[in-house]
């Protein structure tokens, strides 16, 4: 039995599936959802038997944003003292690869939550946007930064200033999502991607994730240096020996995640 009310946790082999479960509020992200999703994800992140984490919502809504009703009465000092939403940052610091499977609305905090994941798969029904400005606020979980890095300034500015949403096709063309799949195949596809990732050497997958993430944090020369150090380091793993031996022997590798 899962100890959480707003997120369901399932394990399928080396893959874990987190399903947001606040259907009446279209998975609006209140503080309870934040605490539970981040708590569940961090517990899975520490588990060596888990190689990839999938995060999904419902068919209608991945998440329709931060909970507007919860935020409405807050004032500046409330928000500042509690450092409102700071725990979401921890989701971006997980070391295990993550996949967001987005169907329906991914608006505001929902779009930001999807962008905190490593691989973003969209159903053809997905709708992305940062409509906060229509409520008199701005993105608060990294949207102005991650959307701009993902789709470039022109589109990010338009979305953040007008609140216009993007459908799945536009999101794919803009580089926000890696692929669009028919809605009824989204979960199966996301789990298949996760199983593929989880079947790789865990330490090597973690290093690949770290290396790609570094591209957003540093200069090209420093990023390449960082990659080169990790590349050299993978030769200390048993899985590099196994992966290359398997290729030479023309057989599938059996990684031990060491
Ligand atoms: N917060 C709270 N409740 C919500 C939210 C939300 N973001 N979205 C939907 N709900 C609730 C509705 O109030 C409604 O509840 P009830 O049945 O009690 O009236 C229920 O979910 C169903 O919603 P609708 O009836 O509106 O469903 P529709 O199918 O008619 O419309 C929409 C779906 C278009 C998604 C619509 O619900 C909508 O526009 N939602 C709000 C989208 C939005 O503006 N999101 C951005 C929120 S702000 C944010 O995410 C970032 C703020 C950053 C703060 C940072 C602080 C540090």
Image (cartoon, rainbow, N blue to C red):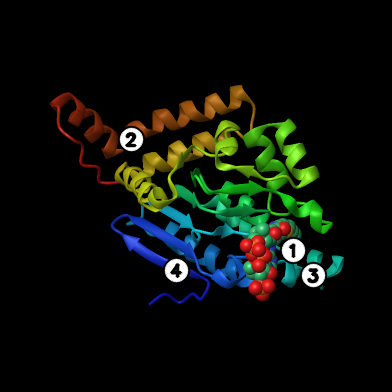
Q: Residue at x 29, y 33 (%)?
A: 240
Height in image: 31 above or below 209? Answer: below
Q: Quadrant of the C terminus?
A: top left
Mark positioned earlier in the residue sequence (4 or 3): 4
Q: Check residue 236 in the rendering and tell me which mark sits there, or answer none.
A: 2
Q: Secondary structure at mark 3?
A: loop
Separation of disc 4 and disc 2 at Cα?
37 Å
Can you tell me whether the CB of the residue at mark 3 lies under 8 Å from the nearest atom of ligand 1?
Answer: no
Q: Secondary structure at mark 4?
A: strand
Residue designated by label 4: 8
Q: Secondary structure at mark 2?
A: helix
**Observer able to see residue 89:** yes
Relative side of 211 to 75, left or right: left
Q: Check residue 72 in the rendering and tell me which mark sits there, or answer none.
A: 3
**Observer able to see residue 66:** no
Looking at the rendered image, the disc whose residue lies closer to the viewer, 3 or 2, is 3
């Amino acid at each position: 039995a899962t100890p959480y009310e707003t997120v369901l946790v399932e394990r399928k082999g080396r893959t874990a599936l987190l399903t947001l479960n606040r259907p009446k509020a279209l998975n609006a992200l209140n503080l309870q959802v934040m605490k539970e999703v981040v708590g569940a994800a961090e517990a899975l992140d520490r588990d060596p038997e888990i190689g990839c984490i999938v995060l999904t919502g419902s068919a209608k809504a991945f998440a329709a944003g931060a909970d507007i009703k919860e935020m409405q009465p807050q004032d500046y000092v409330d928000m500042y003292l509690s450092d409102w939403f700071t725990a979401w940052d921890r989701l971006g610091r997980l070391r295990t690869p993550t996949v967001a499977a987005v169907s329906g609305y991914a608006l505001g905090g929902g779009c930001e939550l999807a962008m905190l994941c490593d691989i973003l798969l969209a159903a053809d029904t997905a709708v992305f946007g940062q409509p906060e400005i229509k409520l008199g606020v701005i993105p608060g979980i990294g949207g102005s930064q991650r959307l701009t890095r993902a789709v470039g300034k022109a589109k990010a500015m338009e979305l953040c200033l007008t609140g216009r949403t993007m459908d799945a096709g536009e999101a794919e063309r803009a580089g926000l999502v890696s692929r669009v799949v028919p809605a009824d195949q989204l979960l199966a596809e996301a789990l298949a991607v996760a199983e593929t990732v989880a079947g790789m050497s865990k330490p090597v997958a973690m290093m690949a994730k770290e290396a790609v993430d570094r591209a957003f944090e540093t200069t090209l020369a420093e990023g390449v240096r960082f990659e080169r150090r990790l590349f050299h380091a993978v030769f200390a793993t048993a899985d590099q020996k196994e992966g290359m031996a398997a290729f030479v022997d023309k057989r599938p590798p059996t990684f031990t995640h060491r």
